[in-house]
Image (cartoon, rainbow, N blue to C red):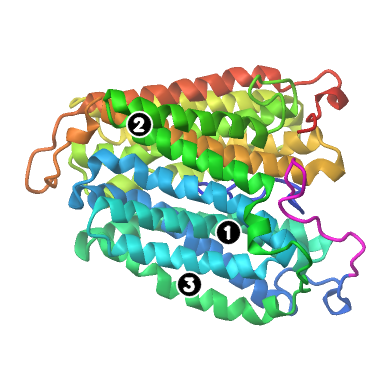
Amino acid sequence: MTADHPHPGPDLGPHPGDTDVAAPDDRPAIPRPHRDRPEPDSAEGGGVLSGPYRALTLGIISVISLVAFEASAVNTAMPVAARALDGIGLYAFAFSAFFTASLFAMALSGEWSDRRGPLAPLFTGIAAFGAGLLIAGGAGTMGMFIAGRGVQGIGGGLVIVSLYVVVGRAYPERLRPSVMASFSAAWVVPVIVGPLVSGTVTEHLGWRWVFLSIPVLILLPLAVMLPALRKLPRTEPGAGHGARRILGSRRCLLALAVAAGACLLQYAGQHAAWPALLPAAAGAALLVPAIVRLLPRGTFRAARGLPSVILMRGLAAGALVAAESFIPLMLVTQRGLSATLAGLSLTGGGLTWALGSYVQSRRRLEPHRERLMGLGMAFLAAAIVMVPLALLDGVPVWIVAAAWTLGGFGMGLNISSGGVLLLKLSRPEDAGSHSASLQMADALGNVTFVGVSGVLFVACGGGRIATATAQTAAPPGHPAAFVAVFAAMAAVAAAGAAVSLRLRCALPVRCALPGP
């Protein structure tokens, strides 16, 4: 779920004009705000930090910043944690568990917020996120660690969607763009300082404290915004609005099928034996039909216009997250870098992501929106191709930082342009549902391509990487596993660049999303 923030992960960032989010199926994932709701007189002329909104705005930004910090910190600490738990062979599961669980939780949170209001899923999500951190930080085995990451994913998915609903209900329409812009801004500082702080904590206190220290910090933003949240209009539960009805909704069931299918396929891919064909077949039978029904018709055949915008979003998000997940592990195990330096190699990408977003906003580039998206994907493909060059002894290790700086700039061009193009091709009343399709494409791209990368990594010998730390033994040589991952994700990014040729429409009205 890569959003308009400079780091992969849950889609907490806005798309331009996102004031509501809805699902493209039989019922909205997030209810549209009431357009006729009067704005509070006391807030007339004020901003998001004016008296009536200050506490809620600061609380929301604080929650997003903590999630962003955790997301950037995990990439830095993960190689050390996986080696300490003797779980290098399950490395990709630690990432895919989060994304898979969050995919289901997004659908659940949408239905829950629609039927019962956003407060219950918001607080449940925050509690689950904190519990997952505690489980992962206290894990004695890689299996327990992965389970903790899954609980974190459930919490993250619940929080993402419920925060959008809070914004729709708590802020007047004139302030929503400013609130959404603050979502992206909340990621900048954590992306810059997260790797440094996480690496320092990992090296001096141990990787567990990267996870165990964050839950305490969650209490402050909750206390700050709780009074404002209590003033939100309450949704009275009606007939059929119980937990069974929510969990049994069409969208929740489809998301659950995708999550279960992805888990079965990744499990089968890491067991090279005939019995693994059974879970592989079951996984494919669950995953493929559910994905087709979750996204609008025409998405997977790159139909011109909006379907291609949505497809391109999933390809970009998946390629970036899958490649980025393995960069710190490669630098730690193959080049002997510390966790801090390995994490810092990703920082430049966050800064140039913001630069790319600024460049694409220049008015004179507006006629070239589709070309900007294709150029951004080409930059990402080139960056991923450059990364495995660091496996060569004669190549300086800083080439990874240089490559990710280029890739971040490409993502800034692509992701921000995609949001603008989506609105250009959407009727105002459809902007919310189309934005929801982008979020779902993010999640599906992350789940699919992180899983594929994990299978390739193990199949090419990555699971045999020694668990000895770089300080006590020479880095083991298993470059083929990393080359396979980066080559595959570079191909995915190149495919996204090709899809950009399908973005332009001669008659935009004919390129609108068909019904589900």
**Which amino acid does the dot numbered 3 rest on?**
Ile
Query: Quick check: 372 above or below 438?
Result: above
Q: Report if the CB atoms under discs 2 and 1 are less than 8 Å apart.
A: no
**Image check: 199 left or right of 317?**
left
Q: Can residue 80 be found in the magenta stretch?
A: no
SS state under label 2: helix
Q: Residue at x 83, y 61 (%)?
A: 174
Of the image marks 2 and 1, the number of the one nearer the N terminus: 1
| Numbered label attached to residue 158 | 1
Q: Residue at x 86, y 75 (%)?
A: 40
SS state under label 1: helix
Q: Quadrant of residue 366?
A: top right
Residue for badge 2 = 268
**Which amino acid does the dot numbered 2 rest on?**
Ala
Q: CA distance from mark 2 to mark 3?
A: 37 Å
Res 322 seen here: no
Q: Residue at x 83, y 18 (%)?
A: 506
Q: Quadrant of the N terminus?
A: top right
Q: CA distance from mark 1 to mark 3?
A: 15 Å
Residue 190 x/y as whole percent: 46, 58
**Which amino acid does the dot numbered 1 rest on?**
Leu
Q: Quadrant of the C terminus?
A: top right
Residue for badge 3 = 218
Tag nearer the camera, 2 or 3: 2
Residue 57 x/y as whole percent: 66, 70
